[in-house]
Amino acid sequence: MAAAVELLARRDYSSGELTAKLRERGFAASAVHAVVSDLIEQRFIDDARSAAHRVSYQMGRGHGPLRIRRELAELEFDELLIETVLAEHSWAQLARDVRVRKFGPERPYDWRERARQARFLQYRGFSADHIRSALGASDLDLDS
């Protein structure tokens, strides 16, 4: 219990992360499970709160829902919890904000620039729909 509380004093961990950390330190699986269960009951660990904080932090860094979903899944958050937390945000607006922050307010002036900005947003974890929304309707002339 002391090791778990020491870890939680530094930052907010999910139950899966804390379990992994305690197992890495050599504690028995049964003891870890009992301690984590107690901490959940006492509300020292709250996976929903932890997931919401992680999503908020990653959004501040300009990451999109696909990248955040992958990270949360790697941290063994419940899939339903991941969907719930991600559904609370406007990803198209974030994609527009990230594009403007990186490339400025002007829309892409040709197909090459449009593709470059789309690749950047895709790398950041935005879906094709969010990218199309961020880049705006294409008024580029197909004949030129």
Image (cartoon, rainbow, N blue to C red):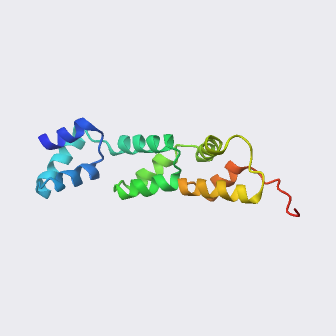
Residue 118, how many percent across, how many down? 65, 56
Instruction: Name which residue lies at 20% across and 47% down.
Output: 37
For this rendering, which residue is in front, 19 or 95?
95
Towards the viewer: 65 or 58: 58
Q: In this view, does 3 lie to the left or right of 105?
A: left
Which residue is located at x 52 percent, y 52 percent?
65
Horizontal arrangement in the rendering, residue 29 relative to residue 54 (left or right): left
Which x, y percent locates residue 67? 48, 55
Q: In which quarter of the image is the N terminus?
A: top left
The residue lying toward the viewer, choosing from 124 and 22, is 124
Res. 1 in view: no
**Residue closest to the eye, 85 or 103:** 103
The residue at 18%/39% (across/down) is 5
Can you tell which quarter of the image residue 90 is in? top right
Can residue 36 be seen here? The reply is: yes
Q: Position of residue 69 (x, y in %)?
A: 46, 55
Residue at 61% of width from left, 44% of height from top?
Answer: 102
Furthest residue toward right: 143
Residue found at the very far top of the displayed protein: 9
Vertically, is 18 above or below 111? above
Residue at the far bottom in the pictured view: 143
Left/right placement of residue 107 relative to residue 57 reads right
From the viewer's perspective, is residue 6 above or below residue 25? Answer: above
* On-image quarter of the C terminus: bottom right
Residue 83 in picture, x, y percent from top left: 47, 52
Task: Tell how many labels.
Answer: 0
